[in-house]
Each structure stands twice: as C-alpha cells, then as structure tokens.
Amino acid sequence: MANTLDHVGLTVSDYGRAKAFYSAALQPLGIALVMELDKATTGGFEGAGFGRGKPDFWISAGTQTSPVHIAFAATSHAEVDAFYKAAMAAGAKDNGAPGLRPHYHKDYYGAFVLDPDGHNVEAVCHRPE
C-alpha cells in the first residue's frame, strides 16, 4: 500500500538553523538530507529535502504564518526515544516526552518536540513493544 502523502514542506525563519536541527533530530529515524536546491537552479526556491532515499520532507526559507504538526514514522520505541534525545540536544523544546498515548490507541508510542520555529514535530511508533 502506498503512503498517503508524497511530500510535506515547512517554511522556516532561519534556513541554516533549521537544516542543522532536522539533520540532527531525524538521524535516529534513518532520515537524512537527500537533496538541496538553490535559488539559482530553481529560479527562486531554496530548500532542503530530507527522507529515506527520496526527499519527502522539505524545508524552505520564508515568512511563517503559523506552526504546523508533522509526525515521522519510527520503527520502534527505541527510535522514538532516540529522536527525542537528538531533537532536544539539537535545540528543541519539549512538547511531550516519549511514552504511550493510549488515548490515540493502545500501542501509540510517541514523542513531541517544538522545532526552532515552533512547529510541533513528532516521532511515532504504532507497534507494541
């Protein structure tokens, strides 16, 4: 079955800071910087694409209107824990430490952080452990 979303993009206030943050925070999930585009190549868009082979999460510089929520899939509770630890070390603010969230479903294990722009970033595992 195919994923529902092909890719997602966020506008960030400080491109360099956000690129460093996401490079560190997403590394435990196996998500890395896959592609970077500059304004000269694209005719005006500057962005960094992260993914597991294919860029499906993008950041670009601009004026932010409101924070968004994005959840990255983790394969284990340990990956969720590692994401949280890496994100906090990279400058995130706590928005919900790793743990079960049975109000979503009995096996929902997630961690929530606020990135440097206030976006609510989550890593979640839906498997029991």
Image (spheres, rainbow, N blue to C red):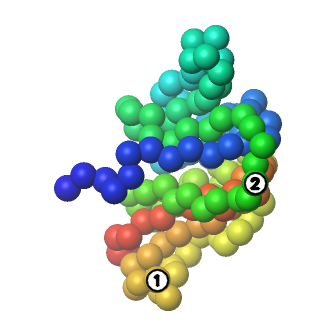
Say whether disc 1 or disc 2 marks the residue closer to the N-terminus: 2
- Image quadrant of residue 98? bottom right
**Can residue 88 be seen in this snapshot?**
no
**Residue drawn at x 58%, y 53% as measured from the top left:** 83
Amino acid at pointer 2: Thr
Classify residue 18 as left or right of residue 76. right
Question: Disc 1 to disc 2, how far (Cα)?
Answer: 28 Å
Q: Is residue 128 above or below residue 9?
A: below
Number of marks in picture? 2
Q: Secondary structure at mark 2?
A: loop
Q: Residue furthest front?
A: 43
User: x and y percent of residue 111 in the render?
Assistant: 59, 66
Front position in the image: 102 or 36: 36
Q: Which mark is residue 104?
A: 1
User: x and y percent of residue 128 in the render?
Assistant: 35, 75
Q: State the quadrant of the N terminus.
A: bottom left
User: x and y percent of residue 34 in the render?
Assistant: 48, 27
Q: Secondary structure at mark 1?
A: loop
Q: Residue furthest left?
A: 1
**Residue drawn at x 75%, y 48% as measured from the top left:** 64
Q: Is residue 39 above or below residue 17?
A: above
**Residue drawn at x 67%, y 72% as measured from the top left:** 96
**Residue drawn at x 53%, y 33% as measured from the top left:** 49
Which of label 1 and label 2 is nearer to you?
2
Q: Which residue is mark 2?
A: 65
**Can residue 71 be seen in this snapshot?**
yes
- Would you call the spot at circle 2 few (<14 residues within 10 Å), some (14-19), or many (20 or more)? few
Amino acid at pointer 1: Tyr
Q: Which mark is residue 53?
A: none
Q: Residue furthest top?
A: 40
User: x and y percent of residue 90 in the render?
Assistant: 74, 45
